Amino acid sequence: MQFCRYLQWLGITTKVFNVGNYRRKLHGAHQLHDFFNPANPDGERSRREAAVEALEDMVYWFKKEQGVVALYDATNSTRSRREMLMAECKKHDIQVMFIESVCEDEALVLHNIMSVKLKSPDYKDMDPEQAVEDFKARIFHYREAYESITEENLTYIKLINVGSQVIINHIQGYLQSRIVYYLMNLHIAPRSIFFSRHGESLYNVMGKLGGDSDLSARGKQYAKSLPLLIATHLGNSEQLTVWTSTMKRTIATAEHLTYPKLAWKALDELDAGVCDGMTYEEIEEQYPEDFANRDEDKFNYRYRGGESYRDVVLRLEPVIMELERQRNILIIGHQAILRCIYAYFMNHSHEKLPYIKIPLHTVIQLTPSAYTCEEKRFKVDIEA
């Protein structure tokens, strides 16, 4: 689920326990709708077996692996199932927060089936029309047993029609508040996020870090080629907003784009502190200990008087929140910044994040979906 990816990106140890995966492991995939009929005792026993095994694994993870946030991903749509969860979690001093999604808009339900459920392992290799009808029948069975959360003693957020209305109850503390805020900003409309580093800068040519230098001649050439490239892959009918940092090289790269633009201070390059304006060779010579520490742990290393990648991730949290609210966005940014945002969407670990390749004069298009994030790269033939 997306908010687990968000919490992991922030550095919070998070894991998903998907009861559907346990069910498929225990009883096989391709269970048709009758398996979920509340009047089917064999199906009920099998589903409960999967739910209990997932719950046991979750408790073990909390106790033995020092987990912080677990997503127990299941329908949990009856009071009895929620009581079972609460009782087991209370025994192990685990706080519980329920997330209920209520959708009364049939068009949204069909959209969810087509864009999400047909890609589920339950319907792999099944005829799409047959899969849609089967899942509609499964929804009917869910409704037969469904009991909406009304228990006043529970902590929960209830999202109605994909967040058009939100009800919260007993939300307390930092983590629960962050999850609520994140969920309130999500939408399911199709969209793409385009990334591009600024065109080659004078500091790039000289091999220097940071600064606020102008574009090189090749960088200016890239800026002129960008409008056609974006229009080709976006389509003239699609709307787009361009985000840049407040630094000259990103603003100059966006100069020829005719879309609405917004400059974010939060998108400014990682602050290299006392090393700003230096080459890596100069850093190794003048600050050999720092240079070695950076090689040892690039994500957590903080430049003297500057920032680490970890600092940048925290700085970018409001940008991520706004990205989740928006439709099509083009971010013209800096290598470290784009690495952090790319790692969020592609679910890369903090260890891999500082080594993600974000080359100059290349546009990266990410298209998020329920289970994956599709990536395309378009390189402009301008040397850098």
Image (cartoon, rainbow, N blue to C red):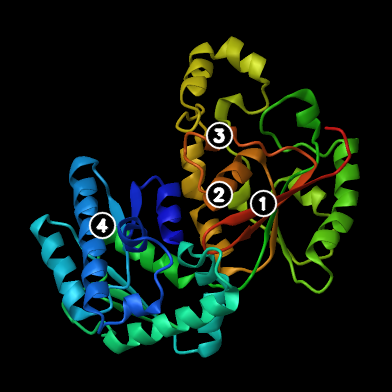
Depth order, front residue of 334/344: 344
Q: CA distance from mark 4 to mark 1?
A: 32 Å
Q: Circle 1 — which element?
A: strand
Q: Label for residue 54?
A: 4
Q: Residues within 10 Å of mark 3 (few under 14, many from 20)?
A: some
Q: CA distance from mark 2 to mark 1?
A: 9 Å
Instruction: Please say if the residues under marks 4 and 1 sit with CB atoms less than 8 Å apart.
Output: no
Q: CA distance from mark 4 to mark 2?
A: 26 Å
Q: Residue at x 54, y 14 (%)?
A: 287
Three-letter amino acid code at the position of disc 4: Ala
Q: Label for residue 346?
A: 2
Q: Label for residue 375?
A: 1
Instruction: Please say if the residues under marks 2 and 1 sit with CB atoms less than 8 Å apart.
Output: yes
Q: Residue at x 46, y 26 (%)?
A: 297
Give the percent coordinates (x, y) of residue 305.
50, 30
Which of the two discs, 4 and 2, sits closer to the camera? Answer: 4
Q: Circle 2 — which element?
A: helix
Q: Label for residue 354?
A: 3
Three-letter amino acid code at the position of disc 2: Met
Q: Circle 3 — which element?
A: helix
Sequence-first disc among 4 and 1: 4
Quadrant in which residue 379 is drawn:
top right
Q: CA distance from mark 4 to mark 3?
A: 34 Å
Q: Is residue 73 left or right of residue 261?
A: left
Give the percent coordinates (x, y) of residue 114.
57, 75
Three-letter amino acid code at the position of disc 3: Pro
Q: Is residue 64 left or right of residue 193?
A: left
